[in-house]
Amino acid sequence: MCRPEHFTVSYRINPWMHPQDPTNTAKAIEQWTTLYDTFVGLGHDVHLIDPLEGLPDMVYTANGGFIIGGIAYGARFAYPQRSPEGPAFMHWFADNGFEVVEPERVNEGEGDILLVGPRILAGTGFRSTVESHAELAGIYGREVVSLTLVDPRFYHLDTAISVLDPLEDDENANIAYVPAAFDDASRRTLETLYPDAIIVSEEDAGILGLNSISDGYNIVIAKRAVGFEKQLRERGYNPIGVDLSELLLGGGGVKCCTLELRR
Protein backbone atom coordinates (compact mmCIF):
# COMPACT_ATOMS: atom_id res chain seq x y z
CA MET A 1 0.00 0.00 0.00
CA CYS A 2 1.00 3.65 -0.36
CA ARG A 3 -0.15 6.39 1.98
CA PRO A 4 -1.88 9.10 -0.14
CA GLU A 5 0.14 12.03 1.15
CA HIS A 6 0.17 13.69 -2.28
CA PHE A 7 -3.32 12.68 -3.39
CA THR A 8 -5.19 15.16 -5.53
CA VAL A 9 -6.86 15.20 -8.94
CA SER A 10 -4.82 17.50 -11.17
CA TYR A 11 -5.39 15.79 -14.54
CA ARG A 12 -7.99 13.56 -16.19
CA ILE A 13 -7.14 10.07 -17.40
CA ASN A 14 -10.37 8.29 -16.49
CA PRO A 15 -14.07 9.27 -16.33
CA TRP A 16 -14.02 9.58 -12.54
CA MET A 17 -11.44 12.39 -12.50
CA HIS A 18 -12.57 16.03 -12.60
CA PRO A 19 -9.64 18.38 -11.90
CA GLN A 20 -11.98 21.34 -11.51
CA ASP A 21 -13.55 19.74 -8.42
CA PRO A 22 -11.75 20.10 -5.08
CA THR A 23 -10.20 17.13 -3.31
CA ASN A 24 -9.32 16.74 0.36
CA THR A 25 -5.95 15.07 0.94
CA ALA A 26 -6.49 14.83 4.70
CA LYS A 27 -9.79 13.01 4.15
CA ALA A 28 -8.15 10.67 1.65
CA ILE A 29 -5.47 9.81 4.22
CA GLU A 30 -8.12 9.23 6.89
CA GLN A 31 -10.12 6.88 4.67
CA TRP A 32 -6.98 5.08 3.48
CA THR A 33 -5.91 4.60 7.11
CA THR A 34 -9.24 2.92 7.85
CA LEU A 35 -8.58 0.51 4.96
CA TYR A 36 -5.04 -0.13 6.24
CA ASP A 37 -6.32 -0.78 9.76
CA THR A 38 -8.99 -3.11 8.37
CA PHE A 39 -6.37 -5.23 6.61
CA VAL A 40 -4.17 -5.36 9.71
CA GLY A 41 -7.18 -6.29 11.83
CA LEU A 42 -7.89 -9.21 9.48
CA GLY A 43 -4.34 -10.49 9.96
CA HIS A 44 -2.85 -9.36 6.66
CA ASP A 45 0.84 -8.46 6.49
CA VAL A 46 0.90 -4.96 4.99
CA HIS A 47 4.03 -3.42 3.46
CA LEU A 48 4.30 0.23 2.47
CA ILE A 49 6.02 1.97 -0.42
CA ASP A 50 7.01 5.60 0.14
CA PRO A 51 4.78 8.11 -1.69
CA LEU A 52 6.63 10.31 -4.17
CA GLU A 53 5.80 13.97 -4.65
CA GLY A 54 4.25 14.69 -8.04
CA LEU A 55 2.69 11.21 -8.31
CA PRO A 56 -0.81 11.67 -6.85
CA ASP A 57 -2.05 8.31 -8.19
CA MET A 58 0.68 6.28 -6.51
CA VAL A 59 -1.84 5.41 -3.80
CA TYR A 60 -3.37 3.02 -6.36
CA THR A 61 -0.65 0.44 -5.80
CA ALA A 62 -2.51 -2.37 -7.59
CA ASN A 63 -1.34 -0.79 -10.84
CA GLY A 64 2.32 -1.06 -9.84
CA GLY A 65 2.86 -4.66 -10.96
CA PHE A 66 1.80 -8.29 -10.73
CA ILE A 67 3.48 -10.96 -8.61
CA ILE A 68 3.33 -14.75 -8.45
CA GLY A 69 5.92 -16.97 -6.76
CA GLY A 70 8.23 -14.08 -5.98
CA ILE A 71 8.44 -12.99 -9.64
CA ALA A 72 7.33 -9.39 -10.14
CA TYR A 73 6.16 -8.32 -13.59
CA GLY A 74 6.60 -4.56 -13.62
CA ALA A 75 4.11 -2.00 -14.89
CA ARG A 76 4.43 0.18 -17.96
CA PHE A 77 1.74 2.83 -17.79
CA ALA A 78 -0.38 4.02 -20.69
CA TYR A 79 -0.38 7.69 -19.65
CA PRO A 80 2.75 9.81 -19.11
CA GLN A 81 1.35 11.23 -15.86
CA ARG A 82 1.82 7.83 -14.22
CA SER A 83 4.89 6.58 -16.09
CA PRO A 84 7.39 7.31 -13.25
CA GLU A 85 5.45 4.96 -10.98
CA GLY A 86 6.64 1.93 -12.97
CA PRO A 87 10.35 2.26 -12.08
CA ALA A 88 9.50 3.27 -8.50
CA PHE A 89 7.59 0.04 -7.93
CA MET A 90 10.20 -2.10 -9.68
CA HIS A 91 12.89 -0.65 -7.42
CA TRP A 92 10.74 -1.47 -4.39
CA PHE A 93 10.23 -5.04 -5.61
CA ALA A 94 13.96 -5.55 -6.09
CA ASP A 95 14.80 -4.02 -2.71
CA ASN A 96 12.32 -6.37 -1.04
CA GLY A 97 13.62 -9.60 -2.51
CA PHE A 98 11.45 -10.10 -5.58
CA GLU A 99 12.79 -11.15 -8.97
CA VAL A 100 11.84 -8.28 -11.28
CA VAL A 101 10.86 -8.65 -14.92
CA GLU A 102 10.84 -5.31 -16.69
CA PRO A 103 7.88 -5.10 -19.09
CA GLU A 104 8.23 -4.54 -22.81
CA ARG A 105 4.50 -3.99 -23.33
CA VAL A 106 2.06 -1.53 -21.81
CA ASN A 107 0.34 -3.03 -18.79
CA GLU A 108 -1.03 -1.58 -15.57
CA GLY A 109 -0.33 -4.40 -13.16
CA GLU A 110 -3.13 -5.88 -11.10
CA GLY A 111 -5.43 -3.20 -12.42
CA ASP A 112 -5.71 -5.39 -15.53
CA ILE A 113 -4.22 -8.70 -14.34
CA LEU A 114 -6.15 -10.90 -11.92
CA LEU A 115 -5.17 -14.33 -10.62
CA VAL A 116 -8.18 -16.64 -10.29
CA GLY A 117 -7.05 -20.05 -9.07
CA PRO A 118 -4.37 -21.28 -11.50
CA ARG A 119 -5.65 -19.04 -14.31
CA ILE A 120 -4.76 -15.41 -15.10
CA LEU A 121 -7.50 -13.11 -16.36
CA ALA A 122 -6.05 -10.17 -18.30
CA GLY A 123 -7.89 -7.06 -19.41
CA THR A 124 -7.44 -4.87 -22.44
CA GLY A 125 -9.41 -2.14 -24.16
CA PHE A 126 -8.43 1.03 -22.32
CA ARG A 127 -5.01 0.69 -20.66
CA SER A 128 -3.09 -2.59 -20.94
CA THR A 129 -2.34 -3.88 -24.44
CA VAL A 130 -3.27 -7.38 -25.53
CA GLU A 131 0.42 -7.96 -26.36
CA SER A 132 1.17 -7.77 -22.64
CA HIS A 133 -0.98 -10.89 -22.17
CA ALA A 134 1.47 -12.95 -24.24
CA GLU A 135 4.28 -11.47 -22.18
CA LEU A 136 2.48 -12.64 -19.02
CA ALA A 137 2.04 -16.17 -20.32
CA GLY A 138 5.71 -16.39 -21.18
CA ILE A 139 6.82 -15.22 -17.74
CA TYR A 140 4.56 -17.37 -15.60
CA GLY A 141 3.74 -20.34 -17.85
CA ARG A 142 0.07 -20.16 -16.96
CA GLU A 143 -3.15 -19.96 -18.94
CA VAL A 144 -3.91 -16.31 -19.68
CA VAL A 145 -7.46 -15.41 -20.71
CA SER A 146 -7.86 -12.08 -22.52
CA LEU A 147 -10.97 -10.03 -21.77
CA THR A 148 -11.94 -6.83 -23.57
CA LEU A 149 -13.39 -3.90 -21.62
CA VAL A 150 -15.76 -1.62 -23.53
CA ASP A 151 -17.32 0.67 -20.89
CA PRO A 152 -15.02 3.55 -19.87
CA ARG A 153 -16.41 3.51 -16.32
CA PHE A 154 -14.65 0.17 -15.98
CA TYR A 155 -11.32 1.14 -17.48
CA HIS A 156 -9.38 -1.51 -15.54
CA LEU A 157 -10.30 -5.17 -15.11
CA ASP A 158 -10.28 -4.87 -11.32
CA THR A 159 -13.18 -2.42 -11.52
CA ALA A 160 -15.31 -5.01 -13.34
CA ILE A 161 -14.33 -8.29 -11.66
CA SER A 162 -13.93 -9.28 -8.02
CA VAL A 163 -11.83 -12.36 -7.24
CA LEU A 164 -13.73 -14.11 -4.44
CA ASP A 165 -11.39 -17.03 -3.79
CA PRO A 166 -7.69 -16.07 -3.73
CA LEU A 167 -5.88 -19.42 -3.48
CA GLU A 168 -3.60 -19.97 -6.49
CA ASP A 169 -4.27 -23.70 -6.76
CA ASP A 170 -8.05 -23.52 -6.26
CA GLU A 171 -9.54 -24.96 -9.45
CA ASN A 172 -13.00 -23.90 -8.24
CA ALA A 173 -12.08 -20.29 -7.51
CA ASN A 174 -15.03 -18.05 -8.30
CA ILE A 175 -15.57 -14.43 -9.26
CA ALA A 176 -18.18 -11.70 -9.29
CA TYR A 177 -18.49 -9.40 -12.30
CA VAL A 178 -20.62 -6.84 -14.12
CA PRO A 179 -21.46 -8.00 -17.69
CA ALA A 180 -21.87 -4.47 -19.08
CA ALA A 181 -18.12 -3.87 -18.76
CA PHE A 182 -17.25 -6.44 -21.45
CA ASP A 183 -17.71 -7.09 -25.14
CA ASP A 184 -19.89 -10.00 -26.26
CA ALA A 185 -17.02 -12.46 -26.71
CA SER A 186 -15.64 -11.73 -23.23
CA ARG A 187 -19.07 -12.13 -21.65
CA ARG A 188 -19.41 -15.52 -23.29
CA THR A 189 -15.98 -16.51 -22.02
CA LEU A 190 -16.86 -15.51 -18.46
CA GLU A 191 -20.18 -17.33 -18.62
CA THR A 192 -18.37 -20.49 -19.72
CA LEU A 193 -15.50 -20.33 -17.23
CA TYR A 194 -17.52 -19.13 -14.24
CA PRO A 195 -21.11 -20.38 -14.50
CA ASP A 196 -21.63 -19.81 -10.75
CA ALA A 197 -20.25 -16.27 -10.71
CA ILE A 198 -22.09 -13.52 -8.85
CA ILE A 199 -23.58 -11.12 -11.38
CA VAL A 200 -23.38 -7.63 -9.92
CA SER A 201 -25.62 -4.71 -10.83
CA GLU A 202 -24.30 -1.71 -12.70
CA GLU A 203 -25.43 0.41 -9.75
CA ASP A 204 -23.05 -1.36 -7.35
CA ALA A 205 -20.28 -1.79 -9.90
CA GLY A 206 -20.65 1.88 -10.82
CA ILE A 207 -19.31 2.92 -7.41
CA LEU A 208 -16.42 0.46 -7.79
CA GLY A 209 -18.12 -2.08 -5.53
CA LEU A 210 -16.32 -4.89 -7.36
CA ASN A 211 -12.95 -3.31 -6.63
CA SER A 212 -12.35 -5.52 -3.61
CA ILE A 213 -9.93 -7.73 -1.65
CA SER A 214 -10.82 -11.22 -0.44
CA ASP A 215 -9.11 -13.76 1.80
CA GLY A 216 -11.66 -16.39 0.80
CA TYR A 217 -14.11 -15.47 3.54
CA ASN A 218 -13.71 -11.80 4.48
CA ILE A 219 -14.16 -9.53 1.48
CA VAL A 220 -13.42 -5.81 1.83
CA ILE A 221 -15.67 -3.83 -0.50
CA ALA A 222 -17.03 -0.32 -1.05
CA LYS A 223 -19.36 0.54 1.81
CA ARG A 224 -22.08 1.83 -0.49
CA ALA A 225 -22.28 -1.38 -2.56
CA VAL A 226 -25.17 -2.72 -0.49
CA GLY A 227 -26.58 -4.99 -3.19
CA PHE A 228 -23.22 -6.69 -3.69
CA GLU A 229 -22.87 -6.96 0.08
CA LYS A 230 -26.17 -8.86 0.25
CA GLN A 231 -25.14 -11.17 -2.61
CA LEU A 232 -21.87 -12.00 -0.86
CA ARG A 233 -23.60 -12.80 2.43
CA GLU A 234 -26.01 -15.10 0.62
CA ARG A 235 -23.00 -17.03 -0.76
CA GLY A 236 -21.44 -17.43 2.69
CA TYR A 237 -18.82 -14.69 2.51
CA ASN A 238 -18.32 -11.95 5.09
CA PRO A 239 -18.34 -8.56 3.31
CA ILE A 240 -16.75 -5.63 5.13
CA GLY A 241 -17.65 -2.18 3.83
CA VAL A 242 -15.10 0.63 3.83
CA ASP A 243 -15.73 4.22 2.72
CA LEU A 244 -13.14 5.36 0.15
CA SER A 245 -15.31 8.08 -1.38
CA GLU A 246 -12.45 10.60 -1.53
CA LEU A 247 -10.14 8.18 -3.34
CA LEU A 248 -13.00 7.35 -5.70
CA LEU A 249 -12.55 10.89 -7.05
CA GLY A 250 -9.33 9.61 -8.64
CA GLY A 251 -11.05 6.48 -9.95
CA GLY A 252 -9.88 4.01 -7.31
CA GLY A 253 -11.28 1.79 -4.59
CA VAL A 254 -10.25 -0.99 -2.21
CA LYS A 255 -8.42 -3.16 -4.74
CA CYS A 256 -6.84 -0.21 -6.51
CA CYS A 257 -5.17 0.71 -3.21
CA THR A 258 -3.85 -2.82 -2.67
CA LEU A 259 -1.15 -4.76 -4.53
CA GLU A 260 -1.01 -8.44 -3.53
CA LEU A 261 2.48 -9.78 -2.83
CA ARG A 262 2.65 -13.51 -3.61
CA ARG A 263 5.98 -14.97 -2.51
Image: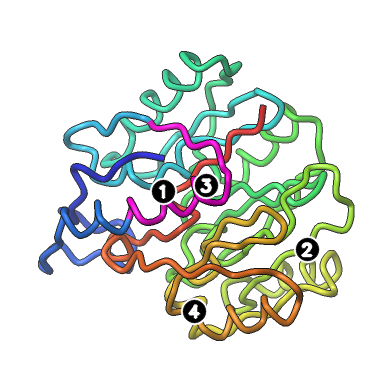
Q: Which residue is mark 4?
A: 225
Percent position (x, y) of residue 50? 30, 29
Of badges 1 and 3, the one in the foreground is 1
Disc with the residue nearer the chain's start (4 vs 1): 1
Per the model, the C-alpha gap separating discs 3 and 2 is 23 Å
Counting other residues with Cα less than 10 Å from the Cα at mark 2, is it few (<14), some (14-19), or many (20 or more)? Answer: many
Per the model, the C-alpha gap separating discs 4 and 1 is 19 Å
Residue 230 falls within the magenta-colored stretch: no
Q: Secondary structure at mark 4?
A: loop
Disc with the residue nearer the chain's start (3 vs 2): 3
* Mark seen at residue 128: 3
Disc with the residue nearer the chain's start (4 vs 3): 3
Residue at 42 percent across and 27 percent down: it is 89
Percent position (x, y) of residue 236? 75, 73
Of badges 3 and 2, the one in the foreground is 2
Magenta segment? 32-48
Per the model, the C-alpha gap separating discs 2 and 4 is 19 Å
* Mark seen at residue 174: 2
Q: Amino acid at mark 1?
A: Tyr
Of badges 2 and 1, the one in the foreground is 1
176 sits left or right of 250 in the view: right
